[in-house]
Image (cartoon, rainbow, N blue to C red):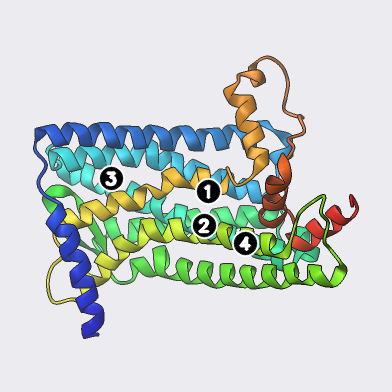
């Protein structure tokens, strides 16, 4: 316990030493930076929303989960970012009691919903890769709707339960800093993270096993150039990016919460404010991670940004993967597992 607390204290001291009260010049730069991040968050998630709604090919259970995630992250960029920016710069000068409560409810609801959506997407990917033959029967539109409803209901209950009823710890009332108690993070972070880590580890092990089985089926083609090492490497990089970015954004915030309740000293308010912003940045990165991995989405984005969808009816356009790398990514991360990828590719050799 002493070693763990020493690590947390060192982490806190490093951040605290670099975070100071910002003068007016830095405050202006802060506004510009956060406004840019907010705009990118809204724009990126709006592209995902338009793509899934407009193109018929993207009307799949998995993409409906991503659609709900994109709506959540868009609201984070459009609502939570501006509110938190106002609180950070003005210390809740305008009606702190009302705005702080409203900001806390929206922040907790949308952040928890975003994390839970990522957790349900990992469950969807587990069935797609590890149980491809039963994937379409187990993960259908009805099941996805239940996942979405559960994610939003839990998020609202967590927010209302720990903000409205006062079952939370106010770190700094002037800065509108809200800290959930020990029970809140269990549903908002720790439990979803444990589920995601276990699922993605299982996915990697299954993908690795299936990739190595390629050698037993003489699956080597100079024309395709798809080797066992490439399949394993791509799977590793994909899962590392998915979990790495998520943990990079959210872990510091919940480390500070753990330090606040387990340690003997208080974590500075400036540190909490910094790691809170880092956590919100995950909503900006989600559309790039969970959408740009799919070459179908990249094709949809090109049609939207070029304005072609306004020149005619392209809703039934066939969005195609381009290149071996894109085909491999889509096969592993979107379709029904590497087994399906192998069977489709072998038919073309």
Is label 3 or label 2 in front?
A: 2
Is residue 26 left or right of 54 when viewed as pictured? left
Q: Position of residue 9 (x, y in %)?
A: 18, 71
Classify 10 Å Cα crowding around label 2: few (below 14), some (14-19), many (20 and above). Answer: some
Q: Which residue is mark 1?
A: 289
Classify 10 Å Cα crowding around label 4: few (below 14), some (14-19), many (20 and above). Answer: few
Q: Which mark is residue 233?
A: 4
* Quarter of the image where one finds residue 88: top left
As drawn, 169 above or below 286: below
Q: Which residue is mark 3?
A: 103
Q: Position of residue 342 (x, y in %)?
A: 81, 59
Is label 1 or label 3 in front?
A: 1
Measured Cα–Cα span from mark 3 to mark 2: 28 Å
Measured Cα–Cα span from mark 1 to mark 4: 17 Å
Residue at x 12% of width, y 32% of height: 25
Classify 10 Å Cα crowding around label 1: few (below 14), some (14-19), many (20 and above). Answer: some
Residue at x 28% of width, y 45% of height: 103
Residue at x 15% of width, y 53% of height: 18
Measured Cα–Cα span from mark 2 to mark 1: 7 Å
Dot 4 falls on a residue whose secondary structure is helix
Say whether residue 260 is visible.
Answer: no
Dot 1 falls on a residue whose secondary structure is helix
Q: Which mark is residue 227?
A: none
Point out the tag, 3 or 2, that comes first from the N-terminus. 3
Say whether residue 261 is visible.
Answer: yes
Check contact, mark 1 vs mark 3: CB within 8 A: no
Which of the image's four quarters has the N terminus?
bottom left
Check contact, mark 3 vs mark 2: CB within 8 A: no
Check contact, mark 2 vs mark 1: CB within 8 A: yes
Q: Which residue is mark 2?
A: 242
Measured Cα–Cα span from mark 1 to mark 3: 27 Å
Q: Position of residue 5 (x, y in %)?
A: 21, 78
């Amino acid at each position: 316990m002493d070693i763990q607390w020493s690590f947390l204290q060192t982490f806190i001291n490093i951040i605290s030493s670099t975070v100071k009260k910002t003068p007016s010049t830095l405050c202006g730069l802060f506004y510009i930076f956060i406004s840019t991040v907010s705009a990118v968050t809204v724009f990126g998630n709006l592209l995902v929303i338009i793509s899934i709604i407009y193109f018929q090919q993207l009307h799949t259970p998995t993409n409906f989960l991503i659609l709900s995630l994109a709506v959540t992250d868009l609201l984070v960029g459009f609502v939570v970012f501006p509110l938190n920016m106002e609180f950070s710069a003005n210390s809740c000068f305008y009606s702190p009691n009302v705005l702080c409560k409203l900001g806390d409810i929206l922040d907790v609801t949308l952040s928890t919903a975003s994390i839970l959506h990522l957790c349900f997407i990992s469950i969807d990917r587990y069935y797609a890769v590890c149980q491809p033959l039963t994937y379409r029967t187990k993960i259908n539109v009805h099941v996805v709707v239940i996942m979405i409803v559960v994610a939003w209901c839990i998020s609202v209950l967590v927010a209302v339960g720990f903000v409205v009823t006062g079952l939370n710890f106010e770190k700094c009332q002037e800065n509108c800093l809200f800290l959930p108690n020990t029970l809140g993070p269990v549903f908002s972070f720790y439990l979803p993270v444990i589920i995601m880590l276990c699922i993605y580890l299982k996915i990697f092990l299954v993908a690795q096993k299936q990739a190595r089985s390629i050698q037993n089926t003489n699956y080597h083609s100079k024309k395709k150039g798809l080797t066992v090492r490439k399949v394993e490497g791509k799977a590793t990089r994909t899962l590392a990016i998915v979990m790495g970015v998520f943990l990079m954004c959210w872990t510091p915030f919940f480390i500070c919460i753990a330090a606040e309740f387990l340690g003997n000293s208080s974590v500075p308010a400036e540190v909490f404010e910094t790691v809170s912003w880092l956590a919100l940045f995950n909503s900006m990165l989600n559309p790039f991670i969970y959408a740009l991995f799919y070459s179908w989405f990249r094709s949809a984005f090109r049609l939207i940004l070029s304005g072609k969808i306004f020149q005619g009816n392209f809703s039934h356009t066939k969005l195609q993967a381009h290149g071996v790398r894109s085909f491999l990514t889509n096969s592993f991360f979107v379709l029904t597992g590497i087994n399906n990828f192998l069977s489709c590719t072998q038919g073309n050799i």
